[in-house]
Amino acid sequence: MKPAQQMARPLAVAHLTALEFAPVPWVRLAARAGFKGVGLRMHPATPDGVSWPVMAGTAAHRELREVMAGEGVAVLDVEFIPVVPTLDPASFVPLFEAAASLGARCVSVSGDDADAARLAANLAALAGLAQPFGLRIDLEFMRWRHVGTLAQARAAIERAAHPNLALVIDALHLSRAGSTPQDVAALPPASIGIVQLCDAPATLPSSDDEAIHEARTARLAPGDGALPLDALLRALAPDVALSVEMPMPSLPAHERIDLAYRGARRVVERAAAVAHATPAF
């Protein structure tokens, strides 16, 4: 990959980085830090989780579109659909309509069903329902969920066999599930949807509870830990969207977002400087 291609990539920021902010102030905060895209948590990731639904046609939706246009910020992805055994794919059509009307590129989901056949069927159904809205369905793996590894996520979308499915590769989850940038480089390029950047210590959490705590409250800024981010970036095609997911409630929100942007920009530019002289894999 040419350095110019890496350095030119705009950066987005995931809503979990500062989920205490409603969409309008969230967009403004991200823009002030330098981000060109945001994720929006419009559906909760857990039954008691935080979300900020903004339905199409509402005053809140119109205000958000105006603020996005004024700040020059796009919506990269809308979160989050846990694909559970009782999922009703059709019930998410209003979410797809809202996401598409905000210009989102994809909707992120997780695999929370031990029945591989049913999970694949529901993933395919979501992908088919999202496709007319111009939205892709991206499956994210996390070690404490049924789809907990990169290999399991790849197997799930391959079993679903729908062209409108891809993967979210979170640098933290990749490490904590035991995979490497070499594993990412071996994926079919079209299967990689979004890559989320952050950093973390080399020591792995000893339990799923510790992994959940780390993922939701104790990530580090890109470049401040031991994750192989340079190698991960060099494993990607130049058109893969990059987002920073760095919840760090110990810092005030504006400091957190600034740190996330500066760290990610520095890592991306460093990887670009090396890429022209070093083959990826």
Image (cartoon, rainbow, N blue to C red):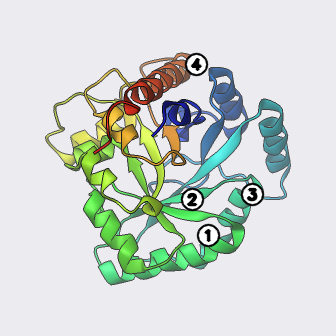
Q: Earlier in the sequence, mark 3 or mark 1?
A: 3
The one nearer the camera, 105 or 26, is 105
Neighbour tally class for label 1: few under 14, some 14-19, many 20 plus, Cα within 10 Å: some
Q: Secondary structure at mark 4?
A: helix
Residue 209 shown left or right of residue 72 in the figure? left
Above or below: residue 42 compared with residue 275: below
> Residue 92's mark?
1
Could you say where residue 58 lies in the image, as x and y percent from the top left? Answer: 83, 54
Neighbour tally class for label 4: few under 14, some 14-19, many 20 plus, Cα within 10 Å: some
Residue 125 shows up from this direction: yes
Q: Earlier in the sequence, mark 3 or mark 2?
A: 3
Residue drawn at x 74%, y 57% is: 55
> Residue 55's mark?
3
Could you say where residue 253 lies in the image, as x and y percent from the top left? Answer: 55, 22
The residue type indicated by label 2 comes to Val
Q: Earlier in the sequence, mark 2 or mark 4?
A: 2
The residue type indicated by label 1 comes to Phe
The residue type indicated by label 3 comes to Met
Report the residue marked by disc 2: 107
Report the residue marked by disc 4: 254
Residue drawn at x 16%, y 44% is: 207
Q: Quadrant of the N terminus?
A: top left
Q: Quadrant of residue 98?
A: bottom right
Q: Earlier in the sequence, mark 1 or mark 4?
A: 1
Above or below: residue 172 compared with residue 59: above
Q: Earlier in the sequence, mark 3 or mark 4?
A: 3
Mark 3 in CB contact with mark 4 (< 8 angstroms): no
Q: Quadrant of the C terminus?
A: top left
Q: Residue furthest front?
A: 277
Neighbour tally class for label 2: few under 14, some 14-19, many 20 plus, Cα within 10 Å: many
Could you say where residue 125 lies in the image, as x and y percent from the top left? Answer: 53, 80
